[in-house]
Image (cartoon, rainbow, N blue to C red):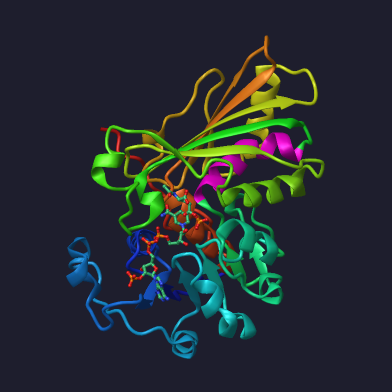
Amino acid sequence: MALKVIKVAIVGVTGYSGLELLRLLKNHRYVEIVSIHNTANHSQMIAEAYPHLKSMYKITTTPFDPLHIMQEADIVFFATSSGVSKDLVAPFIAAHFPVIDLSGDFRLSAEDYASWYHKTPAPQTLIDQTTYSLADFYSASTTNYIANPGCYATATLLALAPIAQHHLLDKHNIIIDAKGGLSGAGKSLTTASHFINANENVTMYKANQHQHIPEITRQLQKWQPNIEHIQFNTSLIPINRGIFISAYVKLNEDTSLDVLHRLYTSTYYQKPFIRVMPEGTLPNIKQVVGTNFADIGLAYNQDTKYLTIVSVIDNMIKGAAGQAIQNMNHLFGFDETMGLELIAQYA
Ligand SMILES: NC(=O)C1=CN([C@@H]2O[C@H](COP(=O)(O)OP(=O)(O)OC[C@H]3O[C@@H](n4cnc5c(N)ncnc54)[C@H](OP(=O)(O)O)[C@@H]3O)[C@@H](O)[C@H]2O)C=CC1
Ligand SMILES: CC(=O)N[C@@H](CCC(=O)OP(=O)(O)O)C(=O)O
């Protein structure tokens, strides 16, 4: 089949994830960026505000206009702060125009969104027309409106998928300790992201209240219906990019590291972005930063019967822009690795 170049619009282009979409899509052979949007500074050359884009992009930001976007483009990405896309997407959904939303606005039911994001949700009728798509488990029945998963949710779900899909999780013992870098919080400065507070420091935040808890629980329940709750906490660590998940789980049956390792390798052997570490070794953040990989390693304690799963991703790529492009590749029939063949910087 001859592949056609698709035209892309990005809303929220001046945020961390929007800029990452621009960076990655430059290397996608079948993509042309036709319009970019933000809230401030319309009609500004993007490379003037962001000098790292000089000589790579000669495109200006323009006011957001859904009709114009639908005339010019084939797909729109929303890389906007939470609470924005839910008010802007109705015309696209009504027209069955492809959308990939990087925000949390369409990942949960209206009721859960109100409880966990503390914001007014999108109408449930709009939510019902969207598909939550963990790109490595993309389903052909996906609708034209894709809710891209959250960054911590991605790393956690990939860590737990092989055992949840085989109904092996002991529902009373699912503990996830998640750590992430500062870019996860977006570009707005906060007290927590102030250099003095973040540098040489580690802080737990949103204990038992993180908005990715219902997102993870919901997907786990699709795989293993008896799961009710997870114990999930997040900490801010002083790095720019990266997520490090340590999951501690017990299993429903007695097993061994060898059996579990074979389960992980068989689940992921045809998934190009999931790399299961050799038995007995664990991944670190640096080996995935700058890439769309999720690297996963296992350790099993025969005395306590706890399985430790370590999963690492780049929050801006696998956790946001990279996964969104992977979903776009699926949606348009491209090879899922297109534009995403990236190797981490070693030194
Ligand atoms: N950072 C990450 O690692 C991850 C982020 N996400 C999600 O992706 C989304 C973007 O995150 P991130 O890049 O960090 O966010 P940033 O805060 O860095 O950027 C937000 C972007 O949204 C734009 N924006 C805000 N309101 C509007 C509006 N009404 N109309 C048009 N544009 C608007 C901003 O424009 P302006 O510059 O003009 O204000 C800016 O370009 C968020 O929902 C986030 O939760 C998901 C996974 C990981
Ligand atoms: C360090 C930091 O604050 N990270 C953010 C990342 C999650 C995120 O982007 O959340 P949504 O995709 O659900 O909007 C957080 O923990 O809230």
Q: Does residue 258 appear in the picture of this structure?
A: yes
Can you give x and y, in whole percent of width and height, for residue 127 in the image? 67, 70
Can you give x and y, in whole percent of width and height, for residue 215 in the image? 63, 52
Residue range corresponding to the magenta coloring: 151-165
Q: Residue at x 57, y 52 (%)?
A: 211
**Does the magenta run of residues contain 163?**
yes
For residue 318, above or below residue 113: above
- Assign the magenta stretch its main secondary structure: helix
For residue 83, above or below residue 346: below
Quarter of the image with the C terminus is top left
**Does the magenta run of residues contain 332?**
no
Q: Residue at x 30, y 40 (%)?
A: 198
Q: Residue at x 33, y 62 (%)?
A: 19
- Viewer-proximal residue, 297 or 56? 297
View quadrant of ligand 1: bottom left
Q: Is residue 116 left or right of residue 228?
A: left
Can you give x and y, in whole percent of width and height, for residue 231 in the image? 63, 36
For residue 229, above or below residue 254: below
- Viewer-proximal residue, 46 or 179? 179
Q: Quadrant of residue 64?
A: bottom left
